[in-house]
Image: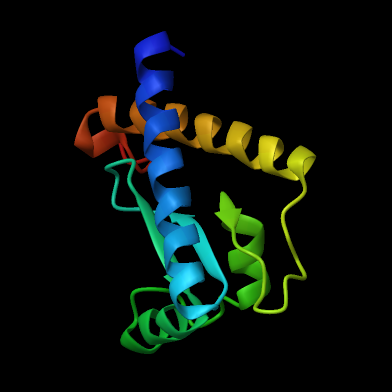
Amino acid sequence: MNIFIRLKASLLLREAILKAEKAHRKTGERYYVMPSYGGEGKLIVMDRYNFRQLKHKGYITRNARVCDMVNEAFYFTPYRNGDGRLAEKDRKDKAMRFFTWIEADRKARKKPKYRRYGKV
């Protein structure tokens, strides 16, 4: 990965983490930094309530569960009582998964539109 792309991606992740931490301090809810699957390489910060609203409206499949959200998230804040904090090793692993996702998203956007989804 190009150093400038990695720097931009790390700034994007850091900004999303700060946004999640700020929202957590304000409300006390657990927030998740999730990938946006629109093909733009952006991140979404959401809580369980917004997750359920997106499921209800059909933006997220009805089969998705909160445990799936925890697995897919690049970062999440602790619960109200402080439990469930992300360990430093896990945080680094999730950051590496984020960089891998950024690289895969960039490669997918470079392909012609008719070949992005396996169509000839």
Name the residue located 36 percent from the left edge and 19 percent from the top edge.
5
Q: Is residue 54 above or below residue 13?
A: below
Q: Position of residue 98 (x, y in %)?
A: 53, 38
Q: Nearer the viewer, residue 2 or 88?
A: 88
Q: Position of residue 45 (x, y in %)?
A: 41, 62
Regarding residue 79, the answer to whether it shows in the image is: yes
Regarding residue 111, the answer to whether it shows in the image is: no
Q: In the rendered image, which quarter contains the C terminus?
A: top left
Q: Nearer the viewer, residue 33 or 117?
A: 33
Q: Is residue 70 above or below residue 39?
A: below
List the single residue furthest toward the bottom: 56
List the single residue furthest toward the left: 113
Q: Is residue 17 above or below residue 103?
A: below
Quarter of the image for residue 77 reads bottom right
Quarter of the image for residue 113 reads top left
Q: Is residue 71 above or below residue 104?
A: below
Left or right of 52 in this view: 36: left
Name the residue located 50 percent from the left edge and 69 percent from the top edge.
25
List the single residue furthest toward the front: 25
Q: Position of residue 2 (x, y in %)?
A: 41, 10
Name the residue located 48 percent from the left edge and 75 percent from the top edge.
47
Left or right of 81 in this view: 120: left
Q: Position of residue 23 (x, y in %)?
A: 43, 68
Colouring scheme, one of rainbow, by chain, secondary structure, one colour: rainbow
Q: Nearer the viewer, residue 61 or 7?
A: 7
Name the residue located 66 percent from the left edge and 66 percent from the top edge.
78
| Image label count | 0
